[in-house]
Image: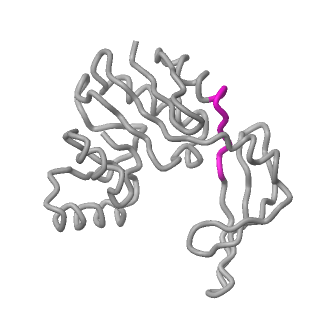
Amino acid sequence: MDIGCNAGLSSFVLEELGFDVVGIDIQEKAVERAKELAKKRGSKAKFYVMNAKNLDFKENTFDLVALLGYPLAHFSIWDFDRILQEIKRVLKPQGYIVIQESDFLWTLIKGFNQPGLEAEGLVRININVDVHEGYLERLLIDFEKGVFLRDKFYIWSPWILRYVLEKNGFEVEFKDKDLILAQRG
């Protein structure tokens, strides 16, 4: 299962690696796009609009659950804790979670006061850090369109991720600086 599959790119890679893939995303438009791309590609991947905190799958369904594309910034620690409970329920015994994540805490410490460029030409200005809730508040600006967007970006670090995974009964292994492999105990 590919959680936060968006338009399905990571799902298609998993399929090419030999997995039967189910992709879920909370955004209906993203899932529609993933289904369109799957049809064009001749992919057998299935896509559903679904909240990862309430997975509509039976227990012990999946060998692998993937969270690719640095998705944790969208989840608070409490949301991710609930998501892990659901993942543990639907993951087969000895199944794996693969998480692609970066040490955003370190990135934040190094460059909080520096504006940055985001995808699609957006300029990012960090406004505030809420250390109690664990998020960074940002202003995203599209100067061409004259659009301003304010959002929350949850801050994750390897030790926080390890804690939440182990709390939920997973054995954690850091494969490199951005890839975490955890096995259901």
Left-right relation of 45 to 81: left
Q: Is residue 64 left or right of residue 102?
A: left
Q: Residue at x 26, y 29 (%)?
A: 62
Image coordinates for residue 66, horizontal then vertical, percent: 38, 38
Looking at the image, what colour scheme do you see? one colour
- Residue lying furthest right: 113
- Pinpoint residue 94: horizontal percent, then vertical percent: 32, 16
Queried whether the magenta region covers residue 121, the answer comes back as no
Q: Quadrant of the N terminus?
A: top left
Q: Residue at x 38, y 44 (%)?
A: 3
Could you tell me which residue is drawn at 31 percent across and 53 percent down?
A: 49
Q: Nearer the viewer, residue 22 or 20?
A: 20
Camera-side residue of 176 and 64: 176
Q: In which quarter of the view is residue 8 placed? A: bottom left
Front-most of residues 3 and 85: 3
Tell me how many marks there are. Answer: 0
Image location of residue 142, percent across then percent down: 65, 79
In magenta, the rendered stretch is 153-160
Q: Where residue 179 sits in the image (x, y, percent)?
A: 51, 36
**Which of the 4 image quadrants contains residue 138?**
bottom right
Horizontally, residue 152 falls left or right of residue 54, namely right
- Magenta span has 154? yes
Work out whether 168 lies above or below 13: above
Which quadrant, please, contains the C terminus? top left
Q: Is residue 180 above or below residue 39?
A: above
User: What residue is rendered at 61% in x and 34% in y?
Assistant: 77
Residue situated furthest top in the rendering = 185
Above/below status of 159 relative to 169: below
